[in-house]
Amino acid sequence: MISSQDVLCFVSATSRSLAIVEKVKAHFLGKAEELHGDYACKKDDPKYVFPSEYEMLEYFCSHSSLAQSFYWHPETGETSHKAMVGAHFTADGMLIVSVTVEARTDQAKAEASPLRLGSSTLDELKAVVGSEVGLVSYSVFPKFEDGRDFIAQCKSLSVQ
């Protein structure tokens, strides 16, 4: 039996930087589609209108009290699987990065299970970011108030 399930991996970044966002995008997506300004920002506020994606991301990296999430998809043909990278800038100055992949599994093949895919993708994301704090969710976006709340949730879920 074939099933489809989203595997969502989230990791607390070591700093709120464009370099980390770009590193995660390049690693998991190859070449990403550009963000659309009206999708990614507050288009009704002239303070949040930017001439380029780079300038928009730099702005959110350097303004640590602003909270905003951005999402990228691979350009057509860049990856063999459905994937999405997220950058979640929190109001307490942190950056949470995420990778969402679609797990299409044949239930008879344990090596292709969503649990294994989640674990391996989380480990890979942690290595790319250089972090030890993260979590995996399946088809449900985890709720967190800010970076400290995210870290507290990760610690509460960790096996002692």
Image: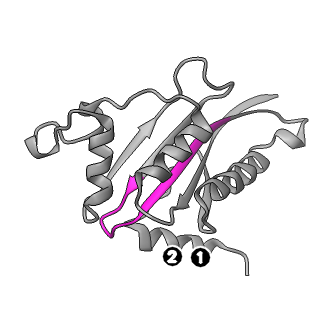
The residue that appears at 44% across and 26% down in the rendered structure is 33
Q: Amino acid at mark 1?
A: Lys
Q: Residue 19: image x %, image y %?
A: 46, 51
Residue under label 2, please give it.
Answer: 152
Q: Quadrant of residue 43?
A: top left
Does the magenta segment cover residue 90?
A: yes
Do tag 1 and tag 2 residues touch (Cβ < 8 Å)? yes
The quadrant of the rendering that contains the C terminus is bottom right
Residue furthest top as drawn? 77
Residue 155 disc label: 1
Which structural element holds mark 1?
Answer: helix
Q: Residue 35: image x %, image y %?
A: 36, 32
Magenta-highlighted residues = 88-102
Residue 2's place in the image compared with 26, above or below, is above
Q: Amino acid at mark 2?
A: Ala
The residue that appears at 60% across and 65% down in the rendered structure is 131
Q: Quadrant of residue 17?
A: bottom left
Q: How many C-alpha atoms fall within 10 Å of the one at disc 1: few (<14), some, or many (≥20)? A: some
Which is more toward the observer, 94 or 4? 94
Taken as a whole, is the magenta stretch helix, strand or loop? strand
The residue that appears at 26% across and 32% down in the rendered structure is 37
| Numbered-mark total | 2
Position of 54 with respect to 111 (left or right) is: left
Does the magenta segment cover residue 106?
A: no
The residue that appears at 33% across and 40% down in the rendered structure is 54
Q: Residue 71: image x %, image y %?
A: 43, 39
